[in-house]
Amino acid sequence: SGASSNDTAVEDIAAWSVGGIVGWGPVSLGGNYADNGDSGQPTGSGWESSYWNVAAGFETGPLYFSAGYMSSIMEGQHFGESTYEHIALTADYTVAPGLAVYAEINLIDEEIGSELLPLASESGELSNSVTSFVAGMAVKF
């Protein structure tokens, strides 16, 4: 996709993406790759980003399980190389028509490399790791 901006301080949008989902019986697999280039970044910054992801799902009766992985990278002038990785594991159970319960575990790792970050370690990187658990109920009527 592409779009131009009247703001000369921001790069025009020039990104592309390709992906798909394949399913057979109770199993489905999907994947995607996107290259955002320097879309929407400050003009002349040299910052570019891209990401890819894969996921798989399995359904049996009232149960549905899925697992997914996403990885993205951003790099550019005075920014070093920053990465983001996310693993999501989910389980859904349909209790009755219109009523389901679900649980999800997310594992996230992020490393930001930058000469500009005052909080960066001696190696010039700042990192975060997060593990989250989400549980809930979905009601449709």
Image: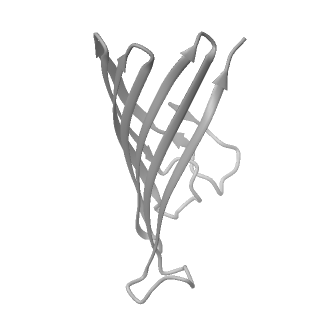
Residue 9 lies, in percent from the top left, at: 65, 57
Residue 45 lies, in percent from the top left, at: 52, 64
141 left or right of 52 in image = right
Q: Give the farthest residue toward the left.
A: 24
Q: Which residue sits at x=49%, y=82%? A: 120
Residue nearest the observer in this picture, 82 or 27: 27
Q: Is residue 131 above or below residue 102?
A: below
> In the picture, which quadrant includes the C terminus?
top right
Residue 18 lies, in percent from the top left, at: 36, 29
Residue nearest the observer in this picture, 43 or 92: 92
* Residue 70: quadrant of the picture: top left
Q: Which residue sits at x=57%, y=59%? A: 43
Residue nearest the observer in this picture, 58 or 114: 58
Q: Is residue 36 above or below residue 45?
A: above
122 left or right of 100 in image = left
* Residue 116: quadrant of the picture: bottom right
Q: Which residue sits at x=56%, y=44%? A: 134
Residue 122 lies, in percent from the top left, at: 41, 90
Q: Which residue sits at x=47%, y=60%? A: 47
